[in-house]
Amino acid sequence: MPDTVLTPTPTDCALVRRHADFGTLGEALDYAAKGAKGFNFHDARGDLAFVYPYAQLARDARDGAMRLIAEGIKPGDRIALIAETGPGFAAAFFAAVYAGALPTPLPLPTSFGGRDAYIGQLAVQLKSCDPSLVLGPEGLLAMVAEAAAGQCPAHDWAVYFADPAPAVALPEARPDDIAYLQYSSGSTRFPHGVAVTHAALLANVAGHSHSTQLGDHDRVISWLPWYHDMGLVGCVLCPVANQISVDYLATEDFARRPLSWLKLVSANPDFSVSYSPTFGYDICARRISSAIDVATRFDLRRWRIAGNGADMIRPEVMQAFVDAFAPAGFDPAAFLPSYGLAEATLAVSIMPPGEGIVCDLIDERTLSGGTQESDGRRPTRYRAIVNCGKPLPGLSVEVRDEAGVILPDRAIGRIFVRGLGIMAGYFRDPEATAAALAPDGWLDTGDMGYLAKGAIYIVGRAKDMIIINGKNHWPQDIEWAIEQLPGFKAGDIAAFAITTPSGEEAPAVLVQCRTSDNDERARLRDAIRTKVKAITGMSCVVELVPPKTLPRTSSGKLSRSKARSQYLSGEIQPFAVAA
């Protein structure tokens, strides 16, 4: 008997598009279900494996909501969900929404940390959100059950929702009700569940839709994890609320075969809308073999929006991607920088489509908090800062100094945002909420940057700043300097401040090293010190550590604060310096 040929959901259909102008997320799915669009799941090679129209998703979710209610779930209860990219999570998430419960996506295991670290992270996050139950795929159930032991039941969602439940009326949500909880990728030891209302979510995804000019011929393509706000809000909830079909590649499959992402973009006959942090573009550029190979394998001419976000946008990496994939027709104007955070639902600002990467050159003395006066001993150096666009409709942004004074254009300070899409607060954590969210609605993002003609420029995280002798230094400047040396890449280096045995503050650099030769290690230490000194003017402590030592967040980003903590506690052991 021949295999069934799967047909993906269409990019366009007769349903009139609405740009997220709904009262609740459930209403948004109900409307999307009237059309023919939906989710399309692909395997590691980029081949279509499962088609899930919104109409079927809505039916499954409503049936699932009745099962939850039959099991005693009440509005406001939390349902923890292991965020596997697939129909099981999608149905469970919207089942919780229809039941009035709060779906709470939690991460999948990563290659960093191992089994015990994953179970420990889950246990802490489960304690924070205090769910009535946790649901996940069969293959992870043993670990999930171990993490949930003593806290809540753990079930395989396929088994849990298998039996029909009595038909009951579903509760009616209100726009100001909490829609879901979002844990940031760094939520490990001290987790903060961001509480997002239906109104905040829909305002943010409506602003995203208008800012990116989503049209009838657009189709979203994504490999981003569903436990991260960019993956969940930008590539799951936004497409539902704006009636867009989506093609998914699981995050773990992207990690193994990153070029499958570009295969999906190439196969789309319509306009592609796809996002990635900088490292996703970097990985793809590093994997190609030749211009001939690129031109033969890929067709990127219809990639309308190549979004950038979730970490610092690095112009040189984006240029490397352009250089690598120009033979496939990639247009650099497709790059669309943005800035956002889970506490603002997702996006705070977005560049207008078609403008690409636009940079502003900032004197490093300004970045360090000094004056513009040169001492004549060193040439003036500049860093290219990417324009992340203007705030979404309904959002206001201010940049303030340490005293809370609003700063003028091009003055670097702490970024505050207020308006539509801001979180209701951190779940059951009034102290953390009060520290981040003022009574007048202004959110302290924790990010440093500046405004120029209404556009936002990000220079780094306030907590990562290295302050030596009253001068500010940005860790990424040190890390990027080392990456210019042969053999190192993004993610190999973590820079932070330490107190030396003499009591002085100094920058320290942990560098993952792949050579076992002591002479070569000594040469590398000297080369790193020389490079950092030349770029930043600072002398630093250099420690070489084994590969895969530096800690990551659940979304794969380097965690400098955790690296510092593990180094100081002795958990990270550097290679010994040869006598």
Image (spheres, helix red, strand yellow):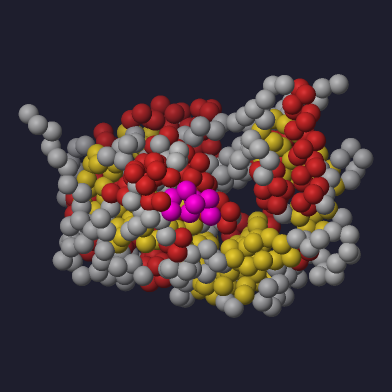
Does residue 17 show up magenta in the picture?
no
Does residue 151 lie above or below 241 as drawn? above
Residue 134: image quadrant is: top left
Q: What percent of the width, then of the height, locates residue 423? A: 50, 63
For residue 250, side relative to residue 385 (left or right): left
Q: Locate the N terminus and report the quarter of the image it occupies.
A: top left
Residue 180 appears in the picture as rendered: no
Q: Is residue 579 above or below residue 202?
A: above
Q: Identify the residue at the far left of this view.
A: 1
Q: Relative to 82, is 451 on the left or the right?
A: right
Magenta-drawn stretch contains 323: yes
Q: In which quarter of the image is the C terminus?
A: top right
Q: Which of 106 and 351 is in front in this view?
A: 351
Q: Where is residue 316 in the image (x, y as percent from the top left)?
A: 58, 54
When the figure is inspected, residue 351 is found, relative to residue 280, above or below; the finding is below
Residue located at (51% from left, 72% from top): 391
Q: Where is residue 502 in the image (x, y as percent from the top left)?
A: 92, 40
Say which residue appears at 66% left-offset and 76% top-offset.
409
Foreground pick, 282 / 180: 282
- Left or right: where 16 falls relative to 307: left
Residue range highlighted in magenta: 319-326
Q: Which residue lies most toward the front here?
A: 292
Picture residue at 58% right of the left edge, 39% below the top: 552
- Residue projecting furthest to the right: 502
